[in-house]
Image (spheres, grey):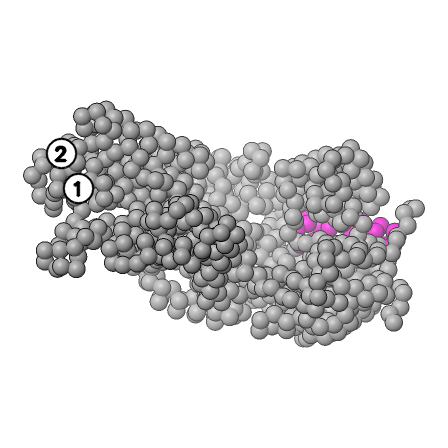
Amino acid sequence: MSEPTNVIAMKQIVKRFPGVLANDHVDFDLRRGEIHALLGENGAGKSTLTNILAGLYRADEGQIFINGQRADIGSPRDAIAYGIGMIYQHFMLVPSQTVTENIILGLDEPRFFLNLPQAEKRVAELSKQFGLHVDPRAHVWQLSVGEQQRVEILKMLYRGANILILDEPTAVLTPLEARELFATLRSMIAQGRSIIFISHHLDEILEIADRVTVMQKGRVTAAGVSPKGMTKNDLARLMVGREIVFALEKKKMDAGAVALKIERARALNDRGLPALRDLSLEVRAHEILGVAGVAGNGQRELSQVITGLRPLVSGRIHLGAYDLTNKAPGEIHELGVGHVPEDRLGTGLASGLSVMHNLILRRYKQAPIAQGIAINWHTARKVSENLVTTFEIATPGVDTRVGALSGGNTQKVILAREISTRPDLLVAVHPTRGLDVGATEAVQKLLLQQREAGAAVLLISEDLDEILAISDRIAVIYDGQIVGEMRTDEADIEKIGLLMAGAN
Amino acid sequence: MTETISTPKPRPARGPRLPFSVALEPRLRIPKWLPWATSLGSVALALLLTALILLYVGGNPLTSFRAIYLAAFGNLGVFSDTLVKATPLILTGLACLLPFRMRLWNIGAEGQFYLGAWGATLIVETLFGKDASPWLFIPLMALSGFGFGALWGFIPGLLKARLNVNEIITTLMLNYIALFFVAYWVFGPWSERGFQMTPTFPRAAWLPRLADYATVFKPFSGLTVHLGFVFAVLACAAVWYLLTHTRFGYEIRLIGDNPNAAQYAGVRIALMTIMVMMLAGGLAGLGGMSEVTGVVHRLQDRISPGYGFTAIIVAWLAKLNPWAVIPVAILFGGLIIGSREIQPSGIARMLQGILLFTLISSEVLNRYRIKFERAK
């Protein structure tokens, strides 16, 4: 039988989906008090495996042992009864309710009468015990994304989970919030909890995981090895089966004329507070300007005022000879601005519609796709099929729903669409967030190609490595202003870090 | 830290122990034939459930179904009556379907239908003498019916677009205003000798019926189906073309799926809201026009037994597919006719209700795969 130190042992798990073998005889085990990372590209089968543990799917074959005993997990309710709690990337919280109300939602006890103060007390205790700082009485809509994630974790702890599965937990967090999360995770394992940590981020895994299991195309390529002494390249090789070159080839290029020119832009955020305070910047043709900064310093609003999704209170924005100030989004695009938005499925795509419908989003008003008021679907299909081939979008066909594609491929749909109209300016916001190594490389290459083709690229990213890797100049944004600019080849990381933190 | 970690114990299974367990699994792909199969299956299930209830209360389901079937579809004559009932349902059904496709909840087809009927009557009452040509009457009445229906859609559309007023509330409330507005005209200015109805329209303002051509072609005699049915079928074709083959329809579907993406693509959502509501109101208005000029031949109080509300169900059951509105409306039209023939007449209504339940429940089968497994 399995050793008692294993809280979970999954043996020879097989799970098939129509046309896909998502898990191919996978073995996985989790020891008490460890953080075990699951690493793999999108579609490698990590989520399927953990969803089987969480009771969302049933394995077609194989066995699961929990604390050495055979377990049958038929539903999320069964999973939590076994002490397994999964924290998804997309939170399932009721915004109008308080933290405590969300946590006790759906519990069998209390059956009828709520004893909220008692529940609040328990939530406060748990939050103190694990360093998950959140006000039990705050309403969820008032919380930041990081705080909402803490509520999700508390929800599982409240239900007595001692095995936590976190699905790419840092994808939605700022670097600071990620730090805090790691501290929490360490305090949890110190107290005997066990954690499965799904991630694409090699740095994170090296930093936090006790052991790592790597999956590739439904199979395990490294089972429970220690990441100590491994390098990023070692992990990447296990994940994609080839050496990933982290230094992208970047041609030397002289910047051209000023393309985007922003002068003293002021704008408000969603809550009506100042988000941009007299922000000015310039991007030239053949140049990538990387905007670095901690999340929430005006990056989102900056991309929105340029692309017409948010009104400018004062200031001016020009693209070459055109005035973009407070023009409508459609018009701005026609003047030559492509936009890869931060929120892929929320803004950039209609996920219920097909790949073709999404690929023509920028072209349906113009010939040859538009013919008078009609749309020529024959041409639309040909254009879309071409884009799918050119940009190597992995999809069964152009009629597939975009929502069914992987993260990397949805991002490629957006890039294919935005780049193929040959914009003079491309605004890319967190273009590689949540993508696996292979997809990240593909996206970054596309941005570099745009630069070579003569476009100006404004790259807004929280990933400093990415900015250092592909941009020509770096601008640091802090509190709605550009607080420092430098050429990348002269960049001093320490100085950037200080500027990002608001120190002068 | 003092908290001890207890070994979790699996709970005993809830409920009776079955020899198998059932699990739902989301489908990654939905085969094209599946929604049709589940729809047909749920119609069959609804008939079965109704039959069981009839058996339970001591009736004979087969005789009842046969009576309903014969009354609605038994011969050309009654089928023609069924089509007459289906006509307003198709047009109001489209008036719900079109805005539903962009997640705009038009609950006001009933009121728009009334305004359309009023608009058509306005032409008869004010513009022409009784001897004007049908070539003048019919196009103008259709236009006026469409126009006043559109006006009744414009009001909630504008309120939604400009002030973000919830269209469910405004369209619902406007139904009652329309109802009483029409009541005012038929009780007051247009009343015929104090009855709550206008005088009968001149023959030239009647939509031609098949029966009108019985002298030319004998089998048409007694067939009540009128030109309005042709309008309705053409309207289905137009809405289908609009949704699937035009930029306008693409924008509707885009907004329906993700308004943020639509805004990002440069779609003017406010303008679309107004236009779609006007178009929907116009379609329902055309339904009202067709009802007064094709069936009642006068405007009277309560000309609709709630077509505009049944239309909401029709649109959903058609799964927001404009062509599917026709068979669904005919089925509902048949149930209306059938319910007149059997006692108690509520059986047909019960069947309608059960049908709604089974069809909506069948959605689960479209989205999920059901797995049966041996219990362990």
The residue sitting at the left extreme is B131
Q: Which residues are magenta?
A: A170-192
Q: Which mark is residue B140?
A: 1
Closer-to-camera residue (B202/B147): B202
Secondary structure type for disc 2: helix
Residue A500 in view (yes/no):
no
Residue A222 in view (yes/no):
yes
Closer-to-camera residue (A427/B35): B35
Q: Position of residue A369 (x, y in %)?
A: 34, 61
Question: Circles 1 and 2: CB distance less than 8 Å?
Answer: yes
- Residue flagged by tag 2: what amino acid is it? Leu
Secondary structure type for disc 1: helix
Q: Residue under mark 1: which chain is it in?
A: B
The residue sitting at the front extreme is B58
Magenta stretch containing residue A186, yes or no?
Answer: yes
Closer-to-camera residue (B278/A391): B278
Q: Which residue is at a point 80% across and 35% down the rendered structure image?
A: A118
Q: Position of residue B89 (x, y in %)?
A: 33, 48
Q: Position of residue A71 (x, y in %)?
A: 79, 64
Mark 1: few/some/many CA within 10 Å (<14, 14-19, 20+): some
Q: Which residue is mark 2?
A: B127
Q: Which residue is at a point 89% across and 68% down the rendered structure image?
A: A3
Q: Which residue is at a point 27% across and 59% down the rendered structure image?
A: B75
Q: Earlier in the sequence, mark 1 or mark 2?
A: 2
Magenta stretch containing residue B248, yes or no?
Answer: no
Q: Residue under mark 2: which chain is it in?
A: B
- Residue flagged by tag 1: what amino acid is it? Leu
- Taken as a whole, is the magenta stretch helix, strand or loop? helix
